[in-house]
Structure formats: structure tokens, C-alpha cells
Image (cartoon, rainbow, N blue to C red):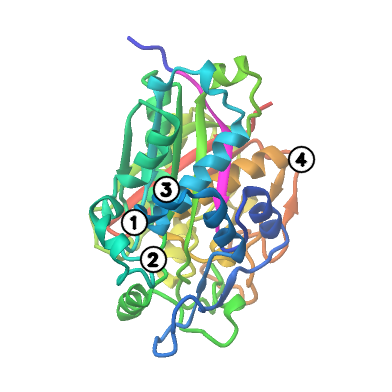
């Protein structure tokens, strides 16, 4: 029987509408900056929704300088984003390739189903030639494994908006069981396209408040009107804690619990009583073997849709009872929008940074309190703390795919 191991976060790489590197994203979130703008990457004039979370200009420079020309032709933007995030995370972790067993290093990437066809590339014969390898969903982790020679398990998984969270949860399980020493885990999506916007408009899931883009994503606010679609990616290095300590790695936090379930209720609406979201959090806390009162922060799925925000609030109160009113709850989607498959990974990374730095990012655009959503949503301004010792990151996907991950402060 393999002895159960502890798991640490030792590297982070992030690209989102607020920056092309982790520190820029983190600092802009602490400042409560919005990355939502009018869409310029394509003509959105005939769309009901004309706003979104686009990647910054700095990302385009990264593509030009960090992605080889041949690789560029053989990849979609989603593959390039997560490859660059992995590069950042690996560099951040201080891994020395000659001092690790690469056969025990895996790559697990979550994606909700990024657009296979990049804008303005459909008529280019070079891209058509490589269409098979470009459109393989397993290309997302494969490029990373090939680049670094990582011979452990390498795969893509898809659980809609929870994909990034599930990828991290699976990585945690592989390391905890002893099957791997280290895993590059994360999520990515580039679904900010005219076609995807029209499909979300059809089910009334996204905001059509176009006049002030930066104010359109407002989780838990009474005037919330749907989420804002965005693009981005995040990769993390999860590592056996003793392995990380032996090489004197920086450690952002420990990962101590993972819970996942299926609501088995509806293909896109959450189960209305909050029972299943609550069960997800309960499973993660049970796995972590810590008292609920130790948790001081919930990084909420917080989409800015009426039903999700309400159900998640109800679920938090079901789990924590009176302690729920002492917990800080915030949503980065207020600032960057909903990056679908990347969301769970980005939010997990921000939770790890919150534990390490003892700072909590805000929920911006919180102006009109909703009596049904009555928790502490860290409104509009970031918060410094001295006693944040444990936190939970929630991801809830279409189809009822739920997951929660418990992180603890490393001291």
C-alpha cells in the first residue's frame, strides 16, 4: 500500500484579461481593476453582447517571441496560451530538469471546449495542413509533455466551467497516492467568439449590458444580469510536499482536500436548493480533515448569474451555518469575466496567492446588496488579513459538474 502524501503548490503561470503574467494579474486584481471591454478582436456590432474579457496586447508579444514558427502553425491559440502558462509555472517553481524523475511528472489540462478555428486563419493553407493536430483536444497537454520530456500521465478533461478545477483535483489525487511526484495542472479556453456569444445569448446566460463594459460583471449584486465571456489560461505546479521541501522550493500553499460530484439535475441550471453545491464543499472539507471553522475564505464560482450566485450563497450557509457570516467570499469573475475551462485554475491560483500573501481580492461592481445574497463578498476593495489559514475554491459547471478544493497556508 502506497503511503498518502501531502501536496504543495510550487509554481504559477497565468494569462488573463488583466495581464500576461501571474504578478501583473494578481496586482491588478488586488487593485480591483476590470479587464472587461468592448470586443475588438472581431466585429461584434450585430451581437446582442458586444463586451468580453480579451487578452492584453502583451500576450500577442509573448506569442511572437516565445512560440516557434512551426509550433505556431500546428497549434490553436488555446494550446499556445496553456503552453506559455506552463513555461511560466515551471520557471516560477525553480524545477531543475536533471534533478527530477520525469517519468513521474504528469500534465493534466482542463478545457470546456475551446474554439478550434482561430480567427482569420480559416483560409490559410498552412493551418489547414495541420488541422488534425491543431484540433486534437489532447494537444493541450501534449505540447507541454513533449517540450519538457514529462513521461507521466498526460491528458485533457472537460467538465465545462469546472474543467480547470477538476484538472487540479485529479493532479492532487495522483500526487497524494504516490503515482506522481509532480504535475503541471491547469485550464484554458478561448471561447470569446461571435458564434459562442450568440449561443450563450440564446440561453440568456450572458450579460447584454454593453454601455459600461467594466461594470457589466457584478457577482452577488442585485442588478447582476449574466456572466461576461472571457479568454485565458492558468497552469500550476503541484508537487509532493516533501519533494518540494527537499529542493527548498517556494511553496504558495498546501492542497489538502478535493471534493467532486454530479448534481444529476439539469444540463445548465444549478440544483435550486443548493444541496449539491453544499455536498461538494462538504466532501472537500472531509477529505482535508480540518474543522470547518478553520476556513476563512471561499473563492466563489460567482458567475454573476441570478441562479448561480443565489444557489452558491445558500450552499455556503448550509455548510458553514453561522460561521458563514465570518467568512470572506469573493469572485474574480467580477474583474476578468468567465474564462470557462480556465476559471477554476485561475481562481485556485488566486486562492493560493491569497494564503501566501494574506490578501484577499475583491468582488468589484458590488453596489446594490441582494437580500437573498447576504454574505461578506469583499465588496470593491481588496482586504489584508493576518489569520487566513485555510480556504476553499469552488467550481460549478454546466451539466452539474461540481468540484471544490481546500487549500491551507504553508508555514
Q: Which residue is mark 4?
A: 386
Cβ atoms under marks 2 and 1 closer than 8 Å: yes
Q: Which residue is mark 2?
A: 191
Foreground: disc 4 or disc 1:
1
Give the image quarter of residue 120: bottom left
Give the image quarter of residue 211: bottom right
Res. 292 visible in picture: no
- What is the magenta segment's predominant secondary structure? strand
Q: CA distance from mark 3 to mark 2?
A: 15 Å
**Label annotation for residue 164:** 3
Which is more N-terminal, label 1 or label 3?
A: 1
Give x and y (percent) for residue 52. 50, 73
Q: Which residue is mark 1?
A: 112
Quarter that holds the N terminus: top left
Q: Residue at x 27, y 58 (%)?
A: 399
Residue placed furthest toward the bottom: 46
Foreground: disc 4 or disc 3:
3
Specify whether residue 254 is painted magenta. Answer: no
Q: Residue at x 31, y 58 (%)?
A: 113
Amino acid at each position: 500500500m502506497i503511503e498518502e502524501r501531502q501536496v504543495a503548490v510550487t509554481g504559477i503561470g497565468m494569462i488573463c484579461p488583466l495581464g500576461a503574467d501571474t504578478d501583473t494579474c494578481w496586482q491588478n486584481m488586488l487593485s480591483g481593476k476590470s479587464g472587461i471591454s468592448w470586443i475588438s478582436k472581431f466585429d461584434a456590432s450585430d451581437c446582442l453582447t458586444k463586451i468580453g474579457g480579451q487578452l492584453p496586447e502583451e500576450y500577442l508579444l509573448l506569442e511572437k517571441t516565445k512560440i516557434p514558427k512551426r509550433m505556431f502553425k500546428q497549434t490553436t491559440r488555446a494550446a499556445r496560451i496553456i503552453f506559455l502558462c506552463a513555461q511560466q509555472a515551471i520557471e516560477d517553481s525553480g524545477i531543475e530538469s536533471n534533478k527530477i524523475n520525469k517519468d513521474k511528472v504528469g500534465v493534466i489540462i482542463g478545457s470546456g471546449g475551446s474554439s478550434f478555428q482561430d480567427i482569420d486563419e480559416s483560409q490559410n493553407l498552412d493551418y489547414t495542413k495541420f488541422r488534425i493536430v491543431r484540433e486534437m483536444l489532447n494537444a493541450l497537454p501534449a505540447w507541454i509533455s513533449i517540450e519538457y520530456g514529462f513521461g507521466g500521465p498526460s491528458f485533457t478533461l472537460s467538465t465545462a466551467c469546472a474543467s480547470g478545477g477538476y484538472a487540479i483535483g485529479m493532479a492532487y489525487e495522483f500526487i497524494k497516492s504516490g503515482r506522481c511526484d509532480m504535475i503541471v495542472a491547469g485550464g484554458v479556453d478561448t471561447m470569446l467568439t461571435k458564434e459562442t456569444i450568440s449561443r450563450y445569448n440564446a440561453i440568456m446566460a450572458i450579460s447584454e449590458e454593453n454601455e459600461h463594459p467594466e461594470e457589466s460583471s457584478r457577482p452577488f449584486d442585485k442588478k447582476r444580469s449574466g456572466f461576461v465571456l472571457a479568454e485565458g489560461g492558468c497552469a500550476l505546479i503541484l508537487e509532493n510536499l516533501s519533494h518540494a521541501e527537499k529542493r527548498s522550493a517556494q511553496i504558495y500553499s498546501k492542497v489538502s482536500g478535493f471534493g467532486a460530484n454530479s448534481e444529476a439535475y439539469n444540463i445548465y441550471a444549478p440544483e435550486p436548493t443548493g444541496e449539491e453545491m453544499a455536498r461538494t464543499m462538504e466532501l472537500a472539507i472531509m477529505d482535508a480533515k480540518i474543522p470547518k471553522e478553520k476556513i476563512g475564505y471561499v473563492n466563489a464560482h460567482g458567475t454573476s448569474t441570478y441562479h448561480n450566485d443565489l444557489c452558491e450563497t445558500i450552499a455556503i450557509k448550509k455548510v458553514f451555518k453561522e460561521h458563514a457570516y465570518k467568512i470572506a467570499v469573493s469572485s474574480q469573475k467580477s474583474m476578468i469575466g468567465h474564462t470557462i475551462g480556465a476559471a477554476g485554475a485561475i481562481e485556485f491560483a488566486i486562492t493560493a496567492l491569497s494564503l501566501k500573501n494574506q490578501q484577499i481580492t475583491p468582488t468589484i461592481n458590488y453596489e446594490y446588496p441582494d437580500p437573498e445574497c447576504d454574505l461578506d463578498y469583499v465588496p470593491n476593495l481588496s482586504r489584508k488579513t493576518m489569520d487566513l489559514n485555510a480556504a476553499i475554491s469552488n467550481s460549478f459547471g454546466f451539466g452539474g459538474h461540481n468540484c471544490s478544493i481546500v487549500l491551507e497556508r504553508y508555514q
